[in-house]
Amino acid sequence: MAVSKSKKNEILENLKVSIKEAKSVAFTTNNWLTVEEITKLRKNLREINSTFTLAKKTLIKIAFKEVFNVEIEDSILVWQIAVVCSNDDAVWAMWKVNEFMKEFKKNPKIEWAWAFFEWAIKDAEETKVIASIPSREVLLGRLVWSMMSPVSALARFFDAATKKLTDEWLSNLGSSTPAKKETPKVEEKVEETKTEEVKEEVKTEEAPKEEETPTETTEA
């Protein structure tokens, strides 16, 4: 279906605005993606303020010439081209698309073609390397996780230790039988001591022996 001149002008103006506001622009070849897959990718990119746009090669060349004064060679505009614009983080959208590509490792449906990154054109291999770099948000998330991980591990350890000790205490409590009360041996010794003291007192209280009365001598 032929596109009218006014429609082409509208697409061109939108494309110029998109690449002008983007912090990085990358391009993919995606001849085999289905409508559902393209819709899914666009939704993922909208969540991070980025876009995925199908565009004619001629319009891409014109847009780059007018916005960046960069001539795009026909040799890098192969197959059906889609434009990935990352607006918040230079690599975030590229990283998202790179993760999406991993879903089609066995049967690639979308691949990197080239990119305009830091005011220079990057070929497919260079683009792959850039796209594999996690975004700032992803790196911060990993940093927070790594910082929280030791704390979480310590909390899990204490929870497990507490549960184990509780289980062992309940198990010992259920299997134990009340011990018989025994009279402390100390008390017996005390009683014996008291008895000995009483005996000693009795001996002490015995009447003293009578003194011998001296025999009177009768004077003659």
Image (tube, rainbow, N blue to C red):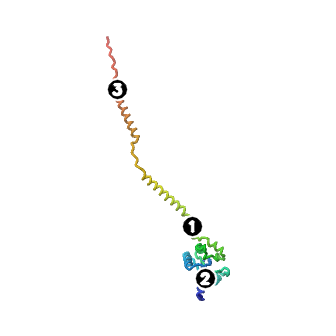
Q: Nearer the viewer, mark 1 or mark 3?
A: 1
Q: Nearer the viewer, mark 2 or mark 1?
A: 2
For the residues marked 2 and 3, what is the alpha-carbon distance in whole angstroms? 137 Å
Figure check: 161 above or below 185: below
Q: Which mark is residue 103?
A: none
Q: Image point 51% across, 60% down: which residue?
A: 156
Is residue 89 shown to the viewer in this render? Answer: no
Of badges 2 and 3, the one in the foreground is: 2
What residue is disc 2 on?
55
**Location of residue 87 (image quadrant):** bottom right
Q: Where does the image place residue 4, in percent across and percent down from the top left?
A: 59, 89
Q: Residue at x 60, y 70 (%)?
A: 134
Residue flagged by tag 3: what amino acid is it? Pro
Inter-mark Cα distance, 2 to 1 = 35 Å
Disc nearer the start of the sequence (2/3) = 2
Q: Earlier in the sequence, mark 2 or mark 1?
A: 2
> Which of these two is toward me, 37 or 75?
37
In the visual, does 27 lie left or right of 170?
A: right
Q: Which residue is mark 1?
A: 142
Asked if the residue under mark 1 is in contact with the one under mark 2, i.e. CB atoms within 8 Å, the reply is no
Helix, strand or loop under label 1: helix
Task: Indicate the position of residue 71 as horizontal and vertical percent values.
Answer: 67, 81
Give the residue at x 34% y 24%.
209
Q: Residues within 10 Å of mark 1 (few under 14, many from 20)?
A: few
- The residue pinned by badge 3 equals 208
Alpha-carbon neighbours of circle 3 within 10 Å: few (<14), some, or many (≥20)?
A: few
Q: Earlier in the sequence, mark 1 or mark 3?
A: 1
